[in-house]
Image (tube, rainbow, N blue to C red):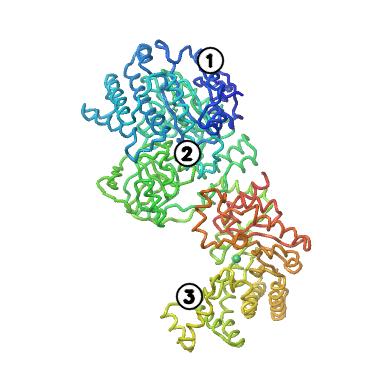
Amino acid sequence: MKYVYLFGNGTADGTAKMKNTLGGKGANLAEMNHLGIPVPPGFTITTDVCSHYYNNELKFPDQLEEQLLEALKSTESIMDLRFGDPDNALLVSIRSGARQSMPGMMETVLNVGLTSQTIPGLIKRSGSARFVYDAYRRLIMMYADVVMEKASGLEPKDGNGIRHILETKLDDYKNEKGYTQDTDLSGDDWKKISDVFKNEIELNLNDKFPDDPLEQLWGAIKAVFISWNGERAKNYRKIENIPDEWGTAVNVQTMVFGNMGEDSATGVAFTRNPATGENKFFGEWLINAQGEDVVAGLRTPSPLNEDTKTKETSHLPSLESSMPDIYSELNDIRGTLEKHYADMQDIEFTIQEGKLWMLQTRVGKRNGSAAIKIAVEMAKEGMITKEAGLLRVKPEQLDELLHPMLDSEAEKSAKILTKGLPAGPGGATGRIVFTADDAEEWHKNGERVILVRDETSPEDVHGMHVAEAILTAKGGMTSHAALVARGWGKCCIVGCSDLQINASKKELKIHGELLHEGDKITLNGTTGNIYKGELDLIDADPDTHPEYKELMVWADEKRKLKIRTNAESPDDAEQAIKFGAQGIGLCRTEHMFFDESRILAVRKMIFADNEKDRRNAVMELLPYQKKDFMGILLAMKGKPVTIRLLDPPLHEFMTLDEDQQIELSNSLGIDAEAVKSRIASLHELNPMLGHRGCRLGIAYPEITEMQATAILEATAELIKDGHDVYPEIMIPLVGTSTEYIDQEKIVRRVATSVEHNYKLKLNFLVGTMIELPRACLTADEIAKHAEFFSFGTNDLTQTTFGFSRDDIGTFLPDYLERNILPEDPFQSLDINGVGKLVTMAVDYGRNVNKNIKIGICGEHGGDPASIQFCKENGLDYVSCSPFRVPIARLAAAQAELK
Ligand code: ADP
Ligand code: MG
Ligand code: MG
């Protein structure tokens, strides 16, 4: 079996298509060779080796060593250097690379091959002891951290890791000598530091830093494989849904150096602006630096070109003006890569003594707004098809455009603390926390937090995930914080050098202003402004985004599913129409009963002990309900509106404290004890399975009669006024066709009388919510009478699993953690189980009533995977909350294309 794939010198064993075997990084390094792009030569060890390693008690396959040494030889001959050779030593980097990029989650070790044997020769060749010893101390630090500590399973407490110990030693040395910057240190200084480091390693890790190049090489390779199962990589995979079985590849690649003087440099770039989507080459670079310096945010990098300079970066030198020839070569590569991959790329490059080398290319992460702009523009440029453009945008990414922004009026009068680089747009407000663990803790207690750090590292992702926004003192637009936030569509500000963070004291100083953990701040991720206190956020208006509008037009052309919304007020309805809703799929009516002016009538109704009193009480509600329905029907402008009759258990209207009970007994003229005992009699052990849904209308037909009257009279009056209205009356929680027939009869009778009184013909439907397994099993019987089905998948999930949605918090987290359930079934439809019932009910229903209209309401209506399922099952529409309507529109189009 082939375990090792070579690349270099314009050829390669692999291609971009081999991501599963070579990982993303390895596959693209191979591909760049095929494209004639200069890449330092090397080889990729396949993901199969990773699987083998884990399946065989951490042992490598037998043929690996031979294949690796062979590949090393080829690399040596391309470079005319030899690994471990005293005169002409080859140095390599050991880089991880999974199928799907996991930025910074796994390990990389640079400068492998530096030993007491190879150092003198390298000093001679490079002419700089400083350069060589600087590289050496970096190797020692990385190796100790990654190979000797992490990969050996040592887990020192926060702050006691070997990396921290070595960093402290370096700081001590600098203080002693009065140095302030790394550039102040000479070759001799770095040599001494290297010795200090090696000593500390022996002291703390009881082991020696290896002086044998092959030992270093194998150690680093193993460490990268082991980092696949590191805590943070595992966490990241969980969040991103990356399977554990994939494994990582390992790339061994000739080192090139961006820190060999003023004609050397390093940088990262995006072929288009990842924050806005603008078609401009966008990146950052540092002269005389190694790659990690840009990403780690240790020095503030300079902009790549003149065009993308901002007020804050205008004084820094661009690559374009400093090294015009190299910039132009890089710009050509940008064009080649974008054309070849037909997508925005994220690239790493290093310039060694005036020669450009490409170290990485991958599809660049972008935020939602940029994703839309890039997809639409590339489709218009003819680089991709419209269909591909539609598939490029994750439905969830639209969320950002619908997300709140800071109220610009509030910003004007707010106290601006300072400004940083705007890395993730939108507004956010929350309480300051200084560590990822604190972020998680505060978040658990229901607080919105903003994570404030000098810089973030992959160890922080769990805290970044729960934070409203991320704010860092260091790093640029391509720093870890910016990259991760962008992937999640989160508000983020980076490189804010005015922040003086004291994480151990949990304090933050900005221009003399002292802030503590828990203090509120507000970020504007679009401008980079940071404000003291909590500012108002306002809803976004996606209609101001031209490419969004265009993409939605394309989506509407492609999709066949209709998209409705769940709304219960005219405001919600209008918002939803703005977002493109084609009707209301679920208008609940219970909240209409809770209004202060009405609740008394409801309670009177509950207390009535004869039909006449009950009817009188219920009919008090009629004028209110009628007004409610007129408002909603009018707002929907002739689009269908599904109104569900009263659903919740009665006791929900009767949660009263002592005082309220007395008040009620006074206003009803009923004895206080009687009130108490009636309330007690309404108590149910399992209200979810109790007296609710159509069971209410069956016990109290007056309720159904009043609601039907309100809906249909509202309809009649609007028709009279020349409006187009189209109500669909939905009977909830039906389990037998007889229940349905009982309730339908009341509605039909009311309709006849309304038509008679208003002398007109009503256009309406009567149907039911399918939310019990028995309704699915007998859907054929029900469909003989019902004109529509709407799957209430929340209750259907509850009753199919026998899970109470309200009590699921006690065990679901454990279920998800241990993979007993792949996902929360209340968020994404359980296709294997609940889905089967849906499929069955659709079949049964359509068999006897081929024109029956079928939709879904409930949370799943806005979930892309569930929408795909609805499309496959031939549903007519999905219904979701107003803010998910655009997401559902795109997901429905994608469902047609997949
Ligand atoms: P990540 O997955 O975190 O991007 P990389 O494998 O890309 O990790 O490496 C981390 C840093 O080291 C990057 O800045 C990269 O450019 C640099 N680097 C990796 N290999 C080499 C090499 N052969 N020569 C020079 N720099 C390298
Ligand atoms: Mg990289
Ligand atoms: Mg329900």
Residue located beneath label 1 in the image: 74
* Percent coordinates x, y for residue 264 in the rendering: 40, 21
Q: How much space separates mark 3 and mark 1, taking CA atoms?
A: 79 Å
Q: How much space separates mark 2 and mark 3, taking CA atoms?
A: 48 Å
* Percent coordinates x, y for residue 755 in the rendering: 71, 77
* For residue 746, above or below residue 435: below
Furthest toward the front, the residue is 57
On screen, residue 797 versus residue 258, left or right, reads right
**Of label 2 and label 1, which has the lower sequence position?**
1
* For residue 547, above or below residue 29: below
* For residue 510, above or below residue 802: above
Kind of residue sitting beneath label 2: Ala
Q: Which mark is residue 655?
A: 3
Kind of residue sitting beneath label 1: Ser
- The quarter of the displayed image where residue 562 is located: bottom right
Residue located beneath label 2 in the image: 233
Residue at 61% x, 71% y is: 693
* Percent coordinates x, y for residue 760 in the rendering: 72, 76
Q: Is mark 1 within 8 Å of ligand 1?
A: no
Q: Is mark 3 within 8 Å of ligand 3?
A: no
